[in-house]
Every structure is written in C-alpha cells, then in structure tokens.
Amino acid sequence: MTDGIRGTAHGTAPVPLSVLDLVTVGSGSTATRSLRTSVALAKLAERRGYHRHWVAEHHSMPGVASSSPAVILAHLAAHTERIRLGSGGVMLPNHAPLVIAEQFGTVEALAPGRVDLGLGRAPGTDGATAAALRRTDRLNEGADDFPQQLAELTRFLDDDFPDGHPYSRIHAVPGPVQGPAGRPPIWLLGSSGFSARLAGVLGLPFAFAHHFSAQNTVPALDLYRESFRPSAVLDAPYALIGVSALAADSEREARRQVMSGALSMVQLRTGRPGLVPSPEEAEAYRFSSMEQEFVDSWLANIVHGTPDAVRDGLNDLQKRTGADELMITAHAHSGEERLRSYELIADAYGLPA
C-alpha cells in the first residue's frame, strides 16, 4: 500500500483532517496576499496536525488564484517539511498527460514522499475558458477520454510503456528513467458516480466534492466501495470528502463570514464572477427570491458556527457518510478569518499545538 494515503487522526477527531485551499482573493485584496495566506495556512496545518494540504485548479475566476496547482505546490513545499501537498485537483482534460507527469515529477523531486496527484475530469471553469485552455471546442471528448488520459499519465509516471508503443522512448523527467524514485499517488476526484466507479475499479483512493454536490455524496461513496477492487495501491477503499466549514467565535460572526462566500457563488452562477465580497458587501446586498433560495440551499451544506458546533457538525457528517478523511475548505473574505477558522477547529478537536 502506498505510504501517505491513509492518514492518522489526532486529538478527538474521528478521522484525519485535511485542508482544501482555493487561494481565495477577497475584495480589496490581491493574489499576492492570498498566496501568502496559503503559505501561512500550510504552516498552520502542518503545525496543528492536519494530514494534507491540497490546492484546486480553477480558471477565469477573479476570486480564486489557484489556476496553477503545481506552481503553488512547489512554493508550499519550500515552506513546509512534513505535511502532504497535492492537487484537489488537476483537471486532466485541460492538459497533455506528459505535461502533468513532468510537473508533478518535479514537485515530487522537491518534496519526496509527500506529494499527491488528485485528478478531475471537469474543466474547472466555463465552456469558453475550457475551449481556450484545450484549443478546441470539442469539450465532451476530453471528459469521455478521461480513462485513456489517466492510463497514459500513469504510464508516463511509471515509465513503463510497452515496447512498440509510440511513446516507449519518451520519458517524463524528473522520473524513473533517472533512477529509483517514488512517485505521487494518484487520486480520482468527482462530484458524481463516474469517477467513483472508475476509482473503485482501479483500486485508487477517491475524493468526493461534498462541498458543492452534497446530494450525491452517499450514493457516490457507496458506488466507490461497491466497485472497489484491491490493487497495488490500496487493499481496501479509502475515500475523503471535501467539506465547506467555517468556525468563528460566535454563531453570528460565522454566519456573517459564510455569507461572503454565498454571495460570491450567486455572482458566479449568474455570470458575474468577481473577487469574494466582504461581509459588509454581503449584508448590503438584496437577494432576489430565486437567489435567496439558492443561498439557503448553499448554506445548508456549509458547517458553520462556534468551534464546538462545527466539530459536532463535522462528526455527524463523518458518521453519515463513513468518510475516511475530512478535507475542510473555508469560504471567507479575508485570509485572517480563514486561518482563524482552521485554528479554532484544531482547538475544538484538541489537535497538537
């Protein structure tokens, strides 16, 4: 079994806790400040016993500065020593598999034994941006070809194309051609059943996006476990779920903070993406009845409140889903509030100080 997949729970946490970092940019701030917050967050997570820190590929979203996961991970690797670092995820159809093998071979060489390669098949953006990334408007082909792209990427990472294959003389470097070395474990990410089943059939770890597809969480995890076949990577299923959670000193303050993220999502869904609004901007905004319905639905899937309330909500979610790991993402306007939330959650669980 590959080291680093199964984490260790600390304190009173029922399962390992991890961080999903969207490198959010709030109104009045900059990408530079947000990336500095990511460094501070990775250091905090390492110090407090979070198992891994992932960043997610998004494009053409002003409020998200994580368009280049490999670049960010290399930077985080230079500022940390132990915590696992990875992509949650790289959207594989946007890239040539050889490019991803080389990028993550490089990050692995910078931080040996602590890199994860999480892969998704969605574009991580709108259709027009996806077409610009892929230089084609035939976007469905990329998603449909995902299993073949995954197989090609795995071959490049392992440097084991068979003799006679057109790529048998091509080597991803850094990589095995340079000598014995580890390589990042592959995770499949999903918000529906496709990647759940594929991860199970291939015996890979699976990460489900509960934070924006909560209604599909339990069916997808059930499908993953039912489909699972032991592999050289895993002898039993291992599934984490991404959870939106924010803790503050009071329930009222937590609500103020998550409303920033709610308004940001309303703007994104209505074709008006921008920087993440401040709590004051969210308080002043007048939601239409349709927007309010969306906000109510969105907030229902965000665990927020006092640290004890967030801890209890996370525990209930873990029991309900049977997730092997909880990966927490904090939607807030400011980096300080995000850092504070992760610290408060760690305190609530008695994680190492």
Image: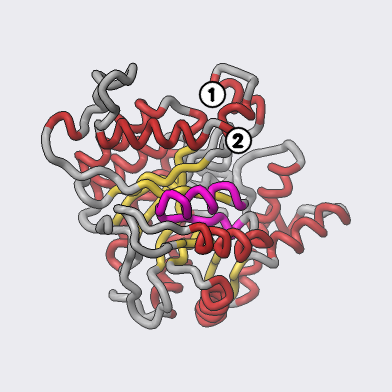
Circle 2: element type: loop
Q: Is residue 306 visible?
A: no
Q: Nearer the viewer, residue 281 or 82?
A: 82
Residue at the outermost right position = 289
Image x and y of residue 298, in percent: 70, 59
Residue type at mark 1 is Leu
Q: Which residue is mark 1?
A: 133
Q: Which residue is mark 2?
A: 125
Magenta stretch: includes residue 182: no
Q: Is residue 186 visible?
A: yes
Labels 2 and 1 touching (C-beta < 8 A): yes
Image x and y of residue 227, in percent: 51, 57
Res. 154 image quadrant: top left
Q: Which residues are magenta?
A: 193-211
Image x and y of residue 288, in percent: 86, 52
The residue that appears at 57% across and 60% down in the rendered structure is: 223
